[in-house]
Image (cartoon, rainbow, N blue to C red):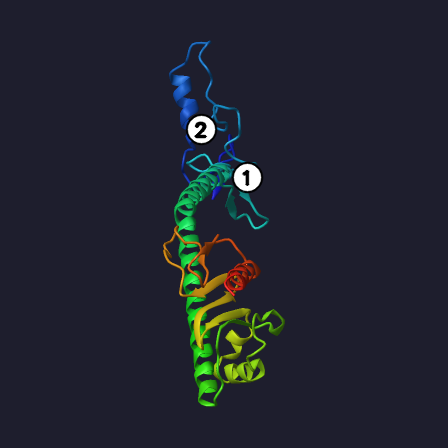
């Protein structure tokens, strides 16, 4: 392979370089003096089209070409447009996710609240059943229960329990209760030997039996007391206990 003596572009044997053709054409068709002169080795912006070895410096799409030490071409792609497109797609994605979050998160929180409140009520019902089973077993052993009592998981918080063998109650209750429920804070109200009310702190959700009504996603009713009254739904377990004690003591 040979090179054009004028521009250095590689040409085949007996091939006339395009720059020679263009030069001959320019000689045969002279342009006015004020017409811009075309140089085949440079683009309209004055940038060279070929290097000193006659190798092209740009692709047909105008992307720059460089060469490594082995003479292999490397195209330098313009990544600016790709980066802008990626940023736009990311912003659109975040915008859509923001809309979905605004719709789904409140619904999910409501569903979670409903599920946890329902589980707390279920736990209170189980405590209620364990306590009643304990009383039935104690009655079979000639224990009597006259009056109204409150028995708590915290033995120091029992109310009106002087006439009850609480030691037997706790040991019998623990034979029924699972370790998970027995380890939580709970209390039961007993009237004439029957459990009429139970409450439990189940992972910071207050469960009662009889259960709370209106467990909709956005409508959880106030917490009921054993007398049928209610206290605000955001009350903690201690407040539920104190409210029941107040009612119990006022009626005895």
Mark carried by residue 53: 1
Q: Using the image, determine if residue 28 lies above or below residue 96.
A: above
Mark carried by residue 19: 2
Q: Position of residue 245 (x, y in %)?
A: 54, 63
Q: Position of residue 187 (x, y in %)?
A: 52, 70
Furthest-right residue in this view: 156
On the rendered structure, is 157 left or right of 58?
right
Residue at left offset 51%, top offset 45%: 73
Q: Using the image, determine if residue 37 lies above or below residue 162.
A: above
Q: CA distance from mark 1 to mark 2?
A: 16 Å
Q: Secondary structure at mark 2?
A: helix
Q: How many marks?
A: 2
- Crowding near the residue tagged with mark 1, few <14, some 14–19, many ≥20 C-alpha atoms within 10 Å: few
Mark carried by residue 132: none
Between 89 and 134, the residue placed more toward the observer is: 134
Residue at left offset 47%, top offset 73%: 190
Between 237 and 178, the residue placed more toward the observer is: 237
On the rendered structure, is 6 left or right of 32?
right
Between 10 and 64, the residue placed more toward the observer is: 64
Q: Position of residue 158 (x, y in %)?
A: 58, 71
- Crowding near the residue tagged with mark 2, few <14, some 14–19, many ≥20 C-alpha atoms within 10 Å: some
Q: Using the image, determine if residue 247 lies above or below residue 34.
A: below
Q: Position of residue 196 (x, y in %)?
A: 43, 70
Between 3 and 91, the residue placed more toward the observer is: 91
Q: Along the polypeptide, which appears first: circle 1 or circle 2? A: 2
Mark 1 near mark 2, Cβ–Cβ under 8 Å?
no
Q: Secondary structure at mark 1?
A: loop
Residue at left offset 38%, top offset 16%: 29
């Amino acid at each position: 392979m040979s090179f054009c003596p004028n521009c250095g572009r590689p040409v085949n044997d007996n091939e006339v370089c395009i720059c020679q053709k263009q030069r001959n054409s320019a000689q045969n068709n002279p342009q006015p003096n004020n017409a811009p002169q075309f140089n085949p080795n440079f683009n309209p912006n004055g940038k060279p089209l070929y290097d000193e070895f006659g190798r092209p410096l740009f692709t047909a799409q105008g992307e720059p070409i460089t060469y490594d030490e082995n003479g292999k071409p490397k195209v330098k792609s313009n990544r600016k447009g790709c980066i802008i497109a990626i940023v736009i797609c990311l912003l659109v994605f975040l915008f859509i996710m923001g809309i979905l979050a605004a719709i789904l998160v409140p619904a999910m929180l409501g569903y979670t609240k409903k599920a946890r409140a329902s589980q707390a009520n279920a736990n209170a019902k189980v405590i209620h059943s364990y306590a009643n089973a304990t009383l039935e077993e104690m009655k079979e052993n000639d224990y009597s229960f006259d009056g109204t009592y409150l028995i708590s998981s915290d033995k120091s918080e029992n109310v009106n329990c002087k006439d009850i063998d609480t030691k037997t109650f706790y040991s019998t209750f623990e034979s029924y209760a699972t370790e998970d429920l027995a380890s939580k804070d709970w209390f039961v109200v007993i009237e004439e030997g029957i459990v009429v009310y139970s409450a439990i702190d189940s992972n910071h959700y207050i469960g009662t039996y009889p259960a709370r009504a209106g467990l909709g996603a956005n409508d959880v009713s106030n917490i009921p007391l054993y007398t049928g009254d209610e206290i605000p739904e955001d009350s903690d377990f201690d407040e539920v206990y104190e409210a029941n004690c107040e009612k119990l003591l006022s009626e005895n």
